[in-house]
Amino acid sequence: MTTAGKSLVEINQKGSAKFLRGGFLMWVVTVFETDTFRCFEYDTKEEAIRTLKAFKNNAILSFTN
């Protein structure tokens, strides 16, 4: 993520975030079901991936700041 060429956040190999200029980072697993969807929020990418692996189909991993 960049603003005017300057990174706002650094993410290490374990998925932990270091904020360089404000902001909030959250990893989100969204599970799509027949009539609805559910979202699960995590602080690290590692935690989110563990949950994502538990769902066999219809789930995505994303992040937001």
Image (cartoon, rainbow, N blue to C red):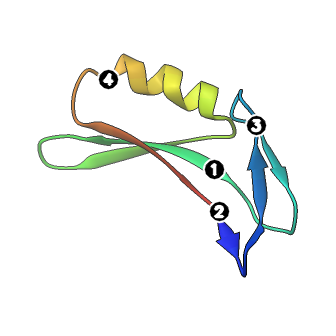
Q: Secondary structure at mark 3?
A: loop
Which residue is at 74% across, 60% downward? Answer: 24
Q: Are marks 4 and 3 in contact (CB under 8 Å)?
A: no
**Which residue: 76% across, 37% down?**
16
Q: Residue furthest bottom?
A: 4
Write the residue at 26% across / 20% down: 56
- Tag 1's secondary structure? strand
* Pointer 2 or 4: first along the chain: 4
- Secondary structure state at the residue bearing disc 4: loop
- Nearer-N-terminus badge (2/1): 1
Q: Disc 1 or disc 3, which is closer to the eye? A: 3
Residue that lies at the very extreme toward the left in this rendered image: 34
- The disc placed on residue 26 is 1
Q: Of the residues under marks 4 and 3, which one precedes in the sequence?
A: 3
Q: Which residue is mark 3?
A: 16
Amino acid at pointer 3 = Ser
Judging by the rendered image, the residue that carries numbered circle 4 is 55
Residue 46 at what x, y percent from top left? 62, 26
How packed mark 2 is, by other alpha carbons closer than 10 Å (few <14, some 14-19, many 20 or more), is few
Q: Quadrant of residue 6?
A: bottom right
Q: Position of residue 12 (x, y in %)?
A: 76, 36
Q: Residue 53's x, y, as percent?
A: 40, 19
Q: Earlier in the sequence, mark 1 or mark 3?
A: 3
Mark 2 to mark 1 CA distance (whole Å): 6 Å
Q: Which residue is mark 2?
A: 65
| Residue ranking furthest to the front | 5
